Image (cartoon, grey):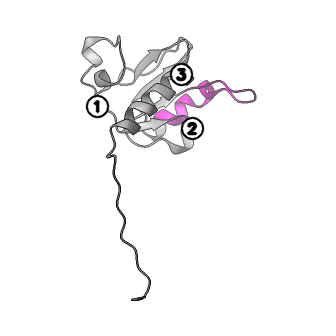
Amino acid sequence: MYLGNFVKNIEKKYSKLNFSGLAFSSKHVKKNNIFFAIKGNKVDGNNYIHDAIRRGARIIVSDKNLKIKKDIVFIKNKNPRKLLSELSYQLLTNKTKNLIAVTGTNGK
């Protein structure tokens, strides 16, 4: 999935950047994910950015200005929670509308 297809007003040089999924918990980050550093009532997701990068995050979305490694793309957004919601919705609507499952139990 290309970043430019999901995020509006992104710099042209990042529009063809490929990502594999979304995560807002550093524990669930997989290779090439977008990590959303969301500040909560008790915990600030910005404290886990380095852990997310170590686990494979390639793109970081935060409401703060941060200095990060050259190979990591940083997107400053005033409301990362809203952007996460919008991207999640876009990804879900791109899934197939019909899902069929065939199940059985021991020939019954």
Q: Which mark is residue 56?
A: none
Q: Give the labeled residue for mark 2.
A: 25
Q: Are marks 2 and 3 in contact (CB under 8 Å)?
A: no
In the figure, 103 relative to 69: above or below? Answer: below
* Closer mark to the observer between disc 3 and disc 1: 3
Which corner quadrant of the image does residue 108 belong to? bottom left
- The three-letter code of the residue at mark 2 reads Ser
Of pointers 1 and 2, the one earlier in the residue sequence: 1
Of pointers 2 and 3, the one earlier in the residue sequence: 2
Which corner quadrant of the image does residue 6 belong to? top left
Taking depth in this image into account, of 10 and 31 the one nearest to the observer is 10
Q: Which mark is residue 82?
A: 3
| Percent coordinates x, y for residue 7 in the rendering | 37, 20
Q: Secondary structure at mark 3?
A: helix
In the figure, 30 relative to 13: above or below? Answer: below
- The three-letter code of the residue at mark 3 reads Lys
Q: Dot 3, how many residues are within 10 Å of its Cα: few (below 14), some (14-19), or many (20+)?
A: few
Taking depth in this image into account, of 87 and 78 the one nearest to the observer is 87
Q: In the image, 7: left or right of 77? A: left
**Which residue is pictured at 50% across the width and 14% down the height?**
77
Q: Dot 1, how many residues are within 10 Å of its Cα: few (below 14), some (14-19), or many (20+)?
A: some
Residue at the extreme right of the image, as rendered = 42
| Percent coordinates x, y for residue 37 in the rendering | 56, 26
Distance between the alpha carbons at the discs numbered 1 and 2: 20 Å
Distance between the alpha carbons at the discs numbered 2 and 3: 16 Å
Of pointers 3 and 1, the one earlier in the residue sequence: 1
| Percent coordinates x, y for residue 1 in the rendering | 29, 34
**Which residue is pictured at 70% across the width and 30% down the height?**
43
Q: Which mark is residue 18?
A: 1
Which corner quadrant of the image does residue 41 belong to? top right
**Which residue is pictured at 66% across the width and 26% down the height?**
44
| Percent coordinates x, y for residue 18 in the rendering | 28, 31
